[in-house]
Amino acid sequence: MNKKYIKILIQSAVVLAVLIIVLNTVFKVRETEQVVITQFGKPVGEPKTTPGLKLKVPFIQKTNYFEKRFMEWDGDPNQLPTKDKKFIFVEAYARWQITDPLQFFKRLTDERGALSRLSDILDGETRDYIANHNLEEVVRSTNRVPTPSGSIGEEVGDTLSDISTGRLDIQKLILQSANEKASDLGIIILDVRIKRLNYVEEVKTQVYERMKSERYRIAEKFRSEGAGEASRINGEKERDLKAIQSEAYRKAEEIRGQADARATAIYANAYDQSAASRSLYSFMKSMETFEKTFDTTTTVILSTRSELYRYLIDPE
């Protein structure tokens, strides 16, 4: 009975040992992975880059898995000076890929070492190219003409200077230079982008003050233009008012003259019927003249030939 148990134990141990050996001999490579086999810490053979089941020497060989997909690198914000002595915070990011896993393992060991080396390369290249270009070149990409948004007080003109190198060009230069320095690391940097730009606090305050001054200048310009327009409108109003008044006075005088002429014609027709009517008309006009000319304090010297004198001495 004991021999039977011992036999079973031995068989189980053999099966377990075979299973452990098989598990340490066979390994799986997925579509998104690539493997470097090492023996006593040193790589042996070619890297395994195709998916499927692979073999290795059990126990003494180790599998080192690396990503085949694109990976990201996010840089920390760095305070950098531009060529025109403007200090800004620059934050960049990149996408990279392992193209030669064997060289990657020899030079960088793992992804942590790769990210550290990428930080050194990309931060350095970003610093160099930012320092060799003006702020406008770092911010802008083209020489496009700004389009007005319709906001009150907005000015669109020649305030933007032309640039020969823009932000996209700087990113391409950083990418090219970084790939040259990473050419022996078994990786390729696929893309580099400036994710965020911002002024340092001191420069930000100066920019805000300059923006306020610009707005005040624009407001003063509009106030001045408004005052000038108001003066022009008031001048036109006074001119038009005088023209209207003058035209109205002329029209009134014309109507009054026509009325007086018509009244005179009516009076003439009425008083020119006979010698008696004409004498009555002459008498009434003389009386109107007396009424309008003389009062209790008036002293008049009349000629004896005057019509007025005739009525004073001979009212008949």
Image (cartoon, rainbow, N blue to C red):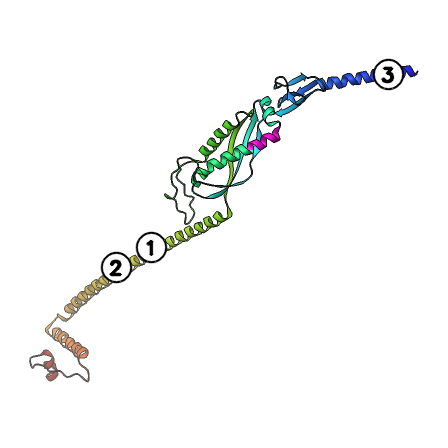
The question of residue 114 being in magenta is answered with yes
- Magenta highlight range: 110-118
Residue at 49 percent of width and 49 percent of height: 202
Quarter of the image for the N terminus: give it.
top right
Residue indicated by mark 3: 8
Could you tell which of marks 3 and 1 lies nearer the N-terminus?
Answer: 3
Instruction: Tell which tag, 2 or 3, sits nearer the viewer.
Output: 3
Mark 1 crowd level (few <14, some 14–19, many ≥20, 10 Å Cα): few
Could you tell which of marks 2 and 3 lies nearer the N-terminus?
Answer: 3
Q: Which mark is residue 32?
A: none
Question: Which amino acid, mark 1?
Answer: Glu
Question: Which amino acid, mark 2?
Answer: Ala
Could you tell which of marks 1 and 2 lies nearer the N-terminus?
Answer: 1
Residue found at the far left of this picture: 305
Residue 157's quadrant in the figure? top left
Q: Main secondary structure of the magenta part?
A: helix
Residue found at the far right of this picture: 1
Mark-to-mark CA distance, 3 and 1:
111 Å
Residue indicated by mark 1: 229
Residue at 75 percent of width and 17 percent of height: 21
Residue indicated by mark 2: 243
